[in-house]
Amino acid sequence: MQTKQYLDYSKGPLPDIDFKDGAPFWEGTRQGEIRFPKCQDCNRFHWYPAILCPYCHSANLKWQALTSQPRLFTWTYLSWNLPVVAIRGPLIVILVEYDEAPDLYLTSNLVECRPEDVKIGMPLEVVFQKVDDKLTMPLFRPMKAK
Amino acid sequence: MNKLRDKVAVVGIGETEYMRRSSRGPREMVIEAVRNALNDARLTVKDIDGVTSGYRGAQHFNQSEMAYNLGIEYRFHGNLGDGSGSNSSSFHLAAMAIETGMADTVLTYYTNSYGSATTRLMGNYGPNLGIMKETFETPYSNNEQIVNFAQIATRYKHVYGFTDEQLNKYMGAIAINERRNSILNGKGVLKKPLTYEDYLKSPMISTPLKRDDCCVLSDGACAWIMTSAKRAKDFPHRPVYVTGMGYGRTPMGGGDGFTQKAGDYFHKPHETPCMDQALQMAGITRKDLDFIQIYDAYTIMLLMFFESLGFCKKGEGGEFAASGAIALEGSLPVNTHGGHLSHSYINGASHVVEAIKQLRGEAGPCQVKNAKLGAISIGTIHDNYVTVFRN
């Protein structure tokens, strides 16, 4: 488990991890996994959490971990003095996509990458930043060449 | 739907002045706009028996308080759409209410009051975007609306293979056109001429969007009054008839839908059918429109709407804008008063007032010659309301 502090999230705003519908996501990140709800009837992942599968409307849903390679879908670099930049410094906001969950994007921040090096479609790897005992935030960095 | 074609007309319009930060709050501005609309139609509050309006919290003025202050007794009340959508949906509701006898004369108003509210920068419309967004997007700073549209612009540029220069040329053409219109209009918030060089020097806020790609958050209020087509002929101004209406929605989860995968991420499945429905009801085609006022929170948003409302092919919105087609003398003048980018950000309400002025022939230096048919398209991501007017 990564414990490195990539970005300062401590001053908030922080996610409400007690929010019941989303709690399994944070349970997953504490265990080093990215989990999304998946319909056990049509086998499609969806996001955000719903009562029924938004595709086949089954109630037979279960949270499951993703195992495929995350890739960068889109991004933006914030450096102007928006309120959040004053707190955290300049940062890159991204949407991440997964082949095995083609119906969703995950919001995160890209770390260990300069804005001039960001490329749409680049392979990413998740890194987990522990904010406190309850909250672990998934961030992404460029996949390192093996 | 065709049963409602040309059954109701707009007979009164009212507005306040528009400014960055007014010393007045939403209540004072709404009261002025409503009184101006009543005067314009030569009506009194006693004549109003229906009210529609969107309500967006502290920066607005809710219907019952408005009626309490002005002494309006009404027997029909409706509201469709969160905030901005209510401006276009007001015509859909009024048409149904008036044609079925639920009301004779319907008032709609809208205000934005950033000066008196605690709203943050750049179109973040407050804390009520839903717990999904608060939980999964806000902590990563994916909550300010400019950040959402910046990611859309980044992906758009990638998918259609545009260079930075091309994207700037396209978005710049929109910003410059709206500034030109706002200057001609004379009542817009931004009046300083904008050249392409100025646009390029505008501060980068969220790549690739610059300050001049963003709407001008502003204070002001608008109101309008509708009645039956039969009665409309007896009013002092030329009636403007509601001739086509269309609505569409794509189901999406989360708060505001910006991070949801729907359509191809730029063009939502409901947008073309919504426009088609409105035109079909009006019995016209896109080429018949003399102008259109489109919701334009950011330059990139208009590029996508030109494509998804069917005015050009996907990926060609930029060339469409840069060709001059959207100018006052072009084939489809867009946001003839200067839009949200330069005139005022009243969530589409000043777009409505401008559409009515155009069809009355009262748009001054921004007047589109011989304007007979015009449309408004008010929507963001989830849904869209199109209304077509004729004179």
Image: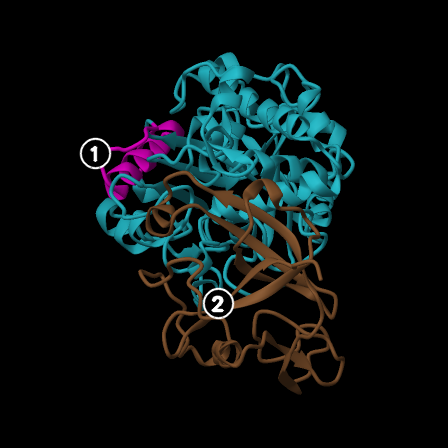
Between B334 and B132, the residue placed more toward the observer is B132
Q: Position of residue A47 (x, y in %)?
A: 60, 69
Q: Is residue B42 above or below residue B107?
A: above
* Foreground label between 1 and 2: 2
Q: Secondary structure at mark 2?
A: helix
Residue under circle 1?
B23
Q: Amino acid at mark 2?
A: Met
Q: Amino acid at mark 1?
A: Ser
Magenta span has B22?
yes
The brown one among the chains is: A
Mark 1 → mark 2, Cα distance in angstroms = 35 Å
Q: Is residue B179 above or below residue B382?
A: above
Please say whether residue A63 is visible from this viewpoint: yes
Q: Residue at the bottom extreme?
A: A60
Decide if residue A29 is on the left or right side of residue B330. Answer: left
Q: Position of residue B187 (x, y in %)?
A: 39, 20
Magenta span has B364?
no
Magenta stretch, residue numbers: B18-44
